[in-house]
Image (cartoon, rainbow, N blue to C red):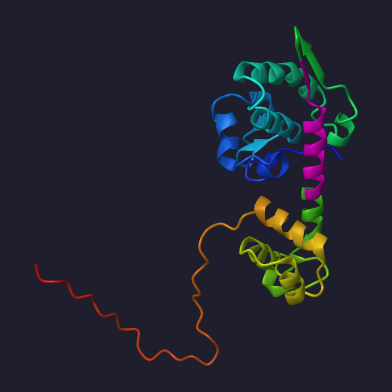
Amino acid sequence: MPPCPLSVVAVPIATRVALRDVNRVIDEGILPAAFLSAENGRRVWATACTLISFYYESAGQLTSEERLNMIRWAEPRLSKWKTLTLASLAKKDWTMRHDFLTIDLAPFVERTAESLSNLEAARALVSSSPDVLGGTPVIEGTRIPVYDVAASVAAGHSLDEILEAYPALDERRVGLAKVYADANPLRGRPKPVNELPTGATVITDRRVPRRRKAV
């Protein structure tokens, strides 16, 4: 299945680059506009994740101009094939030769393909239904909230501790839960509860004005 544009918050999963740096290559025009989409928020074509990864990971070996030249060289190729899967792209020749400099983009294409495969697996792992915990995203086939598992990982709990708390899981599912939560971060504050708990009774709805301190 051809890769679709990724929400910018999911790009760090594919590139292993911090979100602030992903936004930087977009804002500064380092990433060509052909790989961007404003539909449903800021989005990046999956194939372009290879260029973001390359730009930052090669910073210690290549100058900024050399990295930009590589991106310009790769742009028409990735634009032409941006609807292909990265697994297919990895089989093509990604070697640029310029004077004495030779750069191979293939390792970045392969790693991006692997990361996106994990992201796809993470999305397939999670389900949501109004009949299960009121629609809370859970790990498929269980009633385990995916964000609870991811929070345990983020809190530094060991894998053994997490598996003891959630016997229905295994190491792979725990890892994919973290991938899913990173790509789909929770936003906003919990909604206020407008309904009273069962059995509660309103004694009075009179509001008492707050006293102002004397000046």
Quadrant for the N terminus, please: top right
What residue appears at the point 51 percent right and 79 percent down from the top-left corner? 195
160 or 132, which is in the foreground?
160
- Secondary structure predominantly adopted by residues drawn in magenta: helix
The single residue placed furthest to the top in the displayed view is 99
- Determine if residue 186 is in view: yes
| Magenta segment | 102-118
Quadrant for the C terminus, please: bottom left
129 or 74, which is in the foreground?
74
On screen, residue 50 above or below 172 = above
- Give the image location of residue 145, x and y in percent: 70, 69
Q: Quadrant of residue 69?
A: top right
On screen, residue 176 above or below 85 = below
- Give the image location of residue 28, x and y in percent: 54, 26
108 or 183, which is in the foreground?
108
Q: How many marks?
A: 0
Q: Is residue 107 magenta?
A: yes
Q: Is residue 2 left or right of residue 157?
A: right
- Give the image location of residue 101, x and y in percent: 74, 13
Q: Is residue 204 magenta?
A: no
What residue appears at the point 67 percent right and 24 percent down from the top-left corner? 61
On screen, residue 107 above or below 102 = below
Q: Is residue 26 left or right of residue 84?
A: left
What residue appears at the point 89 percent right and 32 percent down from the top-left corner? 88
- Determine if residue 3 is in view: no
Q: Is residue 185 left or right of residue 172?
A: left
- Give the image location of residue 43, x and y in percent: 65, 37
What residue appears at the point 81 percent right and 31 percent down from the top-left corner? 107
Q: Quadrant of residue 98?
A: top right
